[in-house]
Amino acid sequence: MFWIIFRHYRFSGSSNLNDPWVIHANTHLEYLSGKTQDESAGSIVLITKMPKEIYLDNAATTKVDSIVLEAMLPFFDKDYGNASSLHEMGQIAAEAIEKSRQTIAQSISASPEEIVFTSGGTESNNFAIKGIAFANKDKGKHIITTKIEHKSVLNTCKWLESQGFEISILGVDEKGFVKIEDLEKAIRPETILVSIIHGQNEIGTIQSLEELGAVCKKHNVYFHIDACQSYTKTDINVQNQAIDLISVNGHKLHGPKGIGALYIRKGTKIQPWQHGGGHERGMRSGTDNIPGIVGFAKAVKIGLDKNHIEYIKKLKDKLREGLLQISKVKINGPQNEKGLCHILNATFSKIEGEAIAGSLDLEKIFVATGSACASKSLELDPTLLAIGLPPQEVNSTVRFSLSRFNTEEEIDKVLEILPKIVEKLREISPF
Amino acid sequence: MPYSKKVIDAFRNPHNYGKIKDADGVGKVGNPTCGDVMWLYVKVKDDVITDIRFETFGCIAALASSSIVTDLAKGKSLSQMLKLTKEDILKQLGELPPIKIHCSVLAIDALHEAIYDYLLKNKKLIPEEIEKRHQTLEKEKTAIREKYKGWIEKEEELHQDDQE
């Protein structure tokens, strides 16, 4: 029965703001209209009892838009050729890739040959940092990054340290911004790369690409940004921003997982990191993930619609106002246009983040927390520490991250349930 | 959630939470810097725990362990409860993810510290093991305070940099 619902939904192809469960129910009813009364009655009960989930963890990953999914499907079982093959099926695949490459390039005002497809954000970050490091080690072995990076940047840098490179890690101010003068001070003659997260994934800080890029350009140092969280949500334009490398990926913007890209400015001295059959003009070998690439491009096309950003912002404002009605709640990160539209990070003092997230989980509301308890290594979130939150407050944070598929009704529901959870946990808390 | 049904049930409906104002013994363990804090209050009559309550700042496993330890201890003799181990809690909770086992230890420590406090206040004999554990916990508390202090100092230093 579930299989039928799922199949039917998959091909329903609608991409509006409807809740998926509602779509399930509707399409299922249509499907069952040919069945006997008893059968359908039983199924309807089953569906209406299904809990309606509220997914507010879109900074972790997002659902694939059904339009994206539809665009991908032919490339699994119809146009499944290998883009390296010279025959017709291979050429259909190659064409689909190049069309997609154009879409990604246009979105940041780059040219298509500056885009290399990868398996995702982690690979793009690894490729950018290691590729620059080893290609430019004769110039110097010093790399600059920050305390608020994704682990794929920090751990890549850590590994490079073991390979004889020197890493400087910049702090940030209380809103998460890198200070231009700190960067300026950290750059030395042997510095080869500056790698900074563009839109921060915990607190949403958007760094100034113009200012940071200008400093890097002045000192003739490559500038890499990890834009996985910010891509399509805030403007990136390589024509007037001095960025040399940009990591982006699909699954943060309603595209599929397992696909990403690295923008490499023409003339950048970089070494390929994955060797093999010479795909992607020798920059990244491995058979092209065509359904992924097509889906990624489709997701970007839809994501560039500014109305989505306005819509998400409106929801976030509503959520923030509601949270601030609860006593002793503090919002972390910038709340103006310098913050990502979809990320809202809040400290609920005196109670622990995982307990809040767990209570919400039981209500089918899904959020993330910076609490040490929730991390696999019992470590406090380094970004929240970097902006100066004391450990106890870090342990009390919850991150809500929205998408265009969330609704005002969902925010109302969260704001109805959450104060009760907070009140109960505070009753239990000794503080 | 990576928790058993028993853990989730105990977390969803914790028993015996709150404060006992005229408690005969209080055990305070944990540190908010590290994550969990558990305060446990006991009323004792004729060496039997007649009432027990907890206040916890902590995660799902910590709250569930707190609830379970109070259920286990209510109406039991002190000598019986001094023998309680984390395995007894884990048995009640079903399973805890390995990284959360320390939460069950915290609950045992809170209970034993509360009993220790009662024994001390009433000038009763404190078993050697409980005394030892108490000393270890005190040492840990100092160490954490030191660590936390270092963190604060570092923050202050950073702040000074900002002002310069």
Image (cartoon, coloured by chain):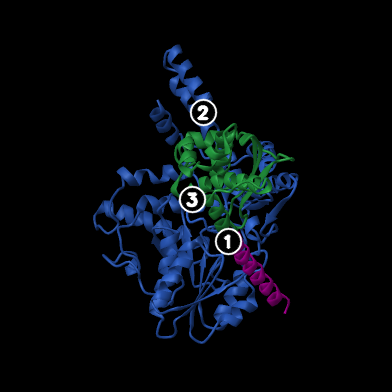
**Image vertical order of residue A295 relative to residue A175, above or below:** above
A318 left or right of B58 in image:
right
In which chain is the residue bearing label 3? A
Between tags 3 and 1, which lies in front? 1
Give the spatial CA distance, label 3 vs label 2.
28 Å
| Residue sitting nearer the eye, B163 or B2 | B2
Give the residue drawn at x 39%, y 58%: A119
Q: Residues within 10 Å of mark 3 (few under 14, many from 20)?
A: many
Q: Residue furthest bottom?
A: A189
- Quarter assignment of residue A126: bottom left
Say the numbered circle drawn on residue A50: 2
Q: Position of residue A189 (x, y in %)?
A: 51, 87
Specify start and end residues of the magenta stretch as a single range.
B139-164
Say the numbered circle drawn on residue A299: 3
Say the numbered circle drawn on residue B139: 1
Q: Position of residue A72 (x, y in %)?
A: 39, 46
**What is the number of callouts on the image?**
3
Q: Give SS at disc 1.
A: helix
